[in-house]
Amino acid sequence: MAVQSAPIQTIGTHPGYSRAKRLLDLAFTLLFLPPLFLTGIVIAVFIKLDSRGPIFFRQKRVGQNGVEFEMLKFRSMYINNDDSTHREAIKQYMNGGILNGNGTMPYKMDNDLRITRVGRIIRKLSVDELPQFWNVLRGEMTLVGPRPPLPYEVELYTLHDRLRLSGKPGLTGSWQVYGRSKVSFQEMIEMDIAYLQRQSLWEDIKLIVLTVPVMLLGRGAA
């Protein structure tokens, strides 16, 4: 299902780049599938020991050209949470506000009581996002691209903002490597649009490599 609140402008993608990008997605994911699987088992055990609820969290996100899909994550929050606080926080962030007291990471909320003890750790290392490799294999996501927004975020997008929906959403990207929770909403939008306009496979590979130290250091994570 596609989000229909407004027409979506797009950035055209070169067919050769799209094919090469898909091959990179498949090759990288299949190559690292065994260690990803073993890491996932360990994370799953800790999640079950820490709090009641399922191992995986499924959430509707908006993908390429406004098409919705079900994104997978390891559950990092307590079950049966009210998302009204997050909705208001996102609206505040998109209007230029900050979500925490010191302003160092405007995109992240301080002291989010919805997050479990294990959830804070796996979010810090970004390993809560490992199940999204399944979304990559399904072709709903790609390794490098703009992060997939929530439907209620897209409802607040301007026509210019919707340009970031031109490509498949990614596991990592320019925002995660160079900004990651420390930039304003409009800066994030411009970074994503600039990335989509470049269409460089070498930049994709560079961003994948640069993501590793970002994850290990937990820079800008929740």
Image: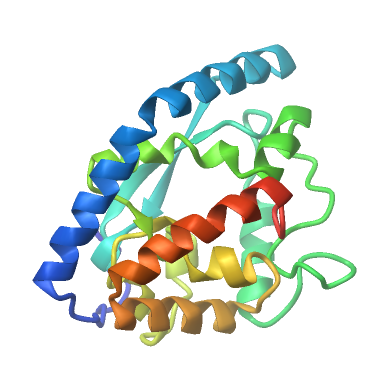
Q: Residue at x 89, y 67 (%)?
A: 101
Q: Is residue 206 above or below residue 84?
A: below
Q: Measured from the top left, where is residue 169 in percent x and y?
A: 36, 59
Q: Relative to residue 119, is residue 105 depicted above or below?
A: below
Give 185 or 12, whichever is nearer the viewer: 12
Which residue lies at the image location 60% right of the left edge and 76% below the top edge? 94
Residue 37: name its quadrant: top left
Q: For residue 79, what is the image quadrant? A: top right
Q: Residue furthest right?
A: 102
Of all residues, the one furthest to the bottom in this rendering is: 160
Q: Residue at x 65, y 79 (%)?
A: 184
Where, by quadrant of the figure, is residue 115 drawn?
top right
Q: Is residue 114 visible?
A: yes
Q: Which coloring applies here?
A: rainbow
Q: How many marks?
A: 0
The location of residue 153, given as percent across then percent down, is 49, 66
- Residue at figure coordinates x 65%, y 37% from the top left: 81
The extreme left residue here reads 15
x, y (%) of residue 9? 25, 82
Q: Nearer the viewer, residue 88 or 135?
A: 135
Q: Is residue 31 left or right of residue 102?
A: left
Q: Is residue 122 left or right of residue 6?
A: right
Residue 115 seen in the current view: no
Rendering coords of residue 186 (x, y %) = 56, 83
Between 19 and 43, the residue placed more toward the observer is 19
Q: Is residue 213 left or right of residue 139?
A: right
